[in-house]
Image (tube, grey):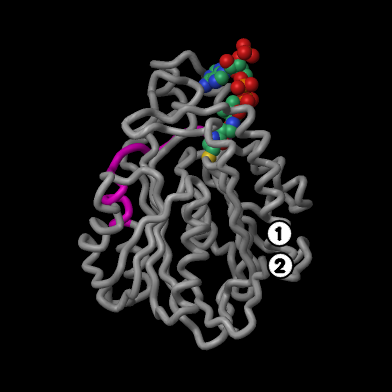
Amino acid sequence: MPRTRDGVRGAVITGWGCAVGNRRVTNHDLEQTLDTSDTWIVERTGISERQVGGSTAELSIRSGQAALEMSGLDPASIDALVLSTTTPDRVVPATSATVQAGLGLQCGAFDVNAACSGWVYGLVNAHGLVAMGAERILLIGTDTLTRITDWSDRNTAVLFGDGSGAVVLEAVDGAGQMLAWDLDADGTAEELLFADIGGFVQMSGKEVFRRAVRIMVDSARKSIAHAGIDIEEVALVVPHQANKRIIEAATKQLGIPLDKSSVVLQRTGNTSSASIPLALVDALDNGRVKMGDLVLFVGFGAGMTAASAVIRWGATS
Ligand code: COA
C-alpha cells in the first residue's frame, strides 16, 4: 500500500503527558510470592520494577490532562479522542467515553485495540482524521494489564505494569510530521498470546519473542523505505517496551545503535498500549528530541500486530 504524503494535510505533536500505577512492585517483591529471582527477571527481560494500579480511565484522564495542559488547549476545542487500550474498564461503553467525560471533552471518542501496537495504530488513525479536516486530536495509550495477569504465574506476572501516555496532535498547513507508517497483523498467531473475556493473559513466551523481533524489524524497514530515508538518519527509536532483549535484537538487526533507543521498561515493565508513549515522553522530558529529528516508533503485540511510523519532529511542511 503506498503511503504518499502528497497533498495530505498533516499534524504535529504539541503536548504530552503520562501516568503510571501508584504502587511500585519490585522484582524483590515478586520473589516473596513466586519461584523467581531479581537476577532472572533482570537478565531475561531487563525489568527491575513496575508500577501497578488504577483503572484504564483514571490513568488516561491523568495523562490526557497533562498533555492538554502542556498544549495550552481548551478541552472543548479537541475534535476527537482516540484511546488505544486492550484493557477497557467495561465491555460497553468504550473507555474513551469515560475519559471524554472526565476530561470535559466535547467530541467523538473511540477505543482502538491492536494490543501492544495500539498506540501506533492510534497515531496513524489520528493523522487520518487530521487529513480529513480535524484540527486537534487527543491520542492516549493506556493499559492496566496487571488486572488480567495471574499473579501466581511466573511466566507472565514478572512482565507487566500499568500506565498511560498521551499526546495532543494539532493540524498544520503543510504535510506535517508523519513521513510514513506501516500497520500489520497476523491473526493466525492468535493462540500465542491471548486473554479470554474475564480470563488471564496466556502466552507462549519463546515463540512470541522470536516473532516479535522479526515483525518489528520487517515493519520498521517498511516505514523507513516508505519514508525514503536511510536508517542512519533515524535520531531516536521508540520501541514497544516488552523485553530489553527484544529491543536489543531488533535494533541490532536494523543496524541502529542501541543508545538511539528510548528504554523505560526497567522501571515500568510492559505497559502495552502505554509503553511507546511512555518511552516517547521520557525521551522528550530528557531533551533527547530536537526539532527536525527523525523518530521511529515500532511496536508489536497480540494478534500478532506490528506497527511502525517515522515522524520528523516538529515538521510543519
Ligand atoms: N523466573 C525464573 N525462572 C523462570 C521464569 C521466571 N519468572 N519464567 C520462566 N522461567 C524458567 C523456565 O521455566 C525455564 O526453565 P527450564 O530451563 O528449567 O525449563 C527457563 O526459565 C527459561 O525459560 P524460557 O521461557 O526459555 O525463557 P526466555 O529466555 O524465553 O524468557 C520470557 C521468557 C517470557 C521473558 C521471554 O520469552 C519473552 O520476553 N517473550 C516475549 C514475551 C512478550 O513480549 N510478551 C508480550 C508481548 S506484547
Mark 2 lies on residue: 226
Residue identified by numbered label 1 = 222
What secondary structure is marked by label 2? helix
Residue 211 within the segment the image draws in magenta: no
Q: Where's ligand 1: which quadrant?
A: top right
Q: Nearer the viewer, residue 26 or 78?
A: 78
How much space separates mark 1 and mark 2, taking CA atoms? Answer: 6 Å
- Residue 298: where, in percent of width, then height? 61, 53
* Residue in the image at 28% along x and 43% along y: 54
**Which residue: 45% across, 35% down?**
160
Residue 59 falls within the magenta-colored stretch:
yes
Q: Residue 47, percent across and down?
A: 53, 34
- Taking 126 as reference, is 233 left or right? right
Q: Is residue 289 left or right of residue 232?
A: left
Span shown in magenta: 43-62
Report the residue that reaches farthest toward the top.
35
Residue 104 versus residue 202: which sits nearer the camera? 202
- Left or right: 252 in relation to 81: right
- Which amino acid is tagged 1? Lys
Mark 1 burial class by Cα count in 10 Å: few <14, some 14-19, many 20+: some
Circle 2: residue type: His
Placement of the N terminus among the 4 image quadrants: bottom right
Q: Are marks 1 and 2 in contact (CB under 8 Å)?
A: yes
As helix, strand or loop, the secondary structure at mark 1 comes to: helix
Q: Quadrant of residue 53?
A: top left
- The residue lying toward the viewer, choosing from 66 and 249, is 249
Point 73% across, 57% down: residue: 221
For the point 65% across and 36% down, which residue is it?
Answer: 245
Which of the numbered marks, if any, corresponds to residue 33?
Answer: none
Identify whether 311 is placed above or below 86.
below
Is the residue 272 above or below the residue 173 in the image?
above
